[in-house]
Amino acid sequence: MRQNSDYDTIQLNPLKPTIKMQTLKVELANRSYPIHIGRNLIADASLILPHLKRKHVAIVTNTTVAPLYLAKLTQTLEAADVRVIPIILPDGEAYKNTETLNSIYDVLLQNRCERSTTLIALGGGVIGDLTGYAAATYLRGVPFIQIPTTLLSQVDSSVGGKTGINHPLGKNMIGAFYQPQLVLADIDTLQTLPAREFSAGVAEVIKYGLIRDADFFDWLEVNMAKLMQLDEQVLSAAIYRSCLSKADVVAKDEHEQGERALLNLGHTFGHAIENAMGYGVWLHGEAVAAGTMMAADLSQRMAWLSAADVARIKNSFIAANLPINPPKLGATKYLDLMGLDKKVENGKIRLVLQQGIGKAVITSDYDTEKLTATLSLC
Ligand code: NAD
Ligand code: GLY
């Protein structure tokens, strides 16, 4: 195992019982915002109040998360004299669409919400993406806050301002870059998360190690069992390190002109899986895990990644109870679906591939026959 100052930070900077939370910042000049990570944060109004223009919020959540955390968050805010409008949506990726988006606008308009009303997303990535897009577009833009309650949303979707909805012809095809005022990652909410959803979030955690943080990948290999048991120290360290990576990438390339596309490792393959199987059948993180294995297979065929490294990647997904074998759709179907992805430029699919663990590259400079060979296995 490597030892360096970054790695020490992981070991020495997990959440200690005496430390309530850790904070890092997404640096985007006058649109910078904090990410707080810690326990029982939704009970602390003082973290939210400084980010409200007016004591008026609409909390957008769903039928699963509302019974768990809506009352608590509402009490926290109402005790601080904040007026709360709840918006409870149906649960599921299948509802990340224009109809649901319109139902958010309906409630905001019926309640005469103004530009100074803050939307709060309380839920996983589906709620975060929908609420963020509603905030970006309602009255041409109102402030919003992310309170992510899944591991995936705490380490990925709540950070960086990608918001949007699905179109029948493709995932996340309609959307906007629109940054939140604040991200509040309350790790206590993960206690109620189904194990399968937790695993899906671990796929995105592993992703950061694979893309740009080999030390983190080493650390994850050692600590995966504890992470899967929701060990508080390991969990908070993993979320912190993931957010640090994402915040750094977003600060450098907010609108995905370059480096940010690395975060799509496994996603072009994964989006094809999600689309083919029907949104919600494979969880996003599961599709990313299998998609990352496809990227690893092609990288190995290109002689960029060793068999030993492919095995390490595979074992990390297995340890996180994630699928490693993509569904058998056939190369033609995969190519067709991958062609729908946003990462297509001038008809050529740009892929994120690996030139080692911790070193991902964005490239269209791969052998198309080797890509077909990878896809033919599936
Ligand atoms: P999700 O939002 O569907 O949540 C997963 C399930 O867990 C849902 O049933 C939800 O109701 C439930 N849930 C949420 N919090 C819970 C809790 N604390 N306890 C119990 N149940 C809880 O899925 P997700 O994995 O969070 O997010 C996936 C979505 O995020 C996809 O739509 C994907 O496209 C999007 N995404 C966006 C970005 C981005 O940068 N904006 C990045 C990655 C993924
Ligand atoms: N999840 C990829 C990104 O935010 O860019």
Image (cartoon, rainbow, N blue to C red):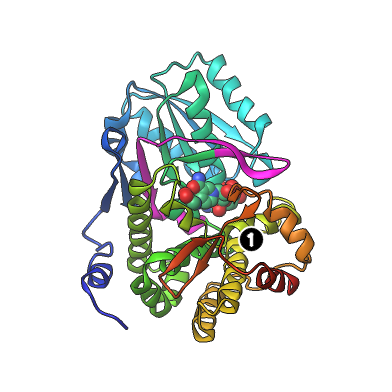
Q: Is residue 119 above or below residue 265?
A: above
Instruction: Determine whether the beta carbon of the residue marked 1 sits less than 8 angstroms from the nearest atom of ligand 1.
Output: no
Q: In which quarter of the image is residue 26?
A: top left
Q: Please report the residue visible at 33 percent of the width from the left and 24 percent of the height from the top.
A: 81
Q: Dot 1, how many residues are within 10 Å of its Cα: few (below 14), some (14-19), or many (20+)?
A: many
User: What amino acid type is highlighted by mark number 1?
Assistant: Phe
How far from the left and from the top, in percent, is residue 168?
73, 41
Question: Looking at the picture, does residue 29 appear above or below residue 358?
Answer: above
Residue 19 visible in image: yes
Provide the residue span drawn in magenta. 164-192
Check if residue 273 falls in the magenta segment. no
* Nearer to us in this view, 17 or 101: 101
46 on left or right of 242: left
Q: Position of residue 145 (x, y in %)?
A: 40, 36
Location of residue 365 in the rendering, given as x and y in whole percent from the top left corner: 55, 64
Reading the image, the residue beneath label 1 is: 269
Q: In the picture, which quadrant includes the N terminus? A: bottom left
For residue 170, side relative to residue 82 (left or right): right
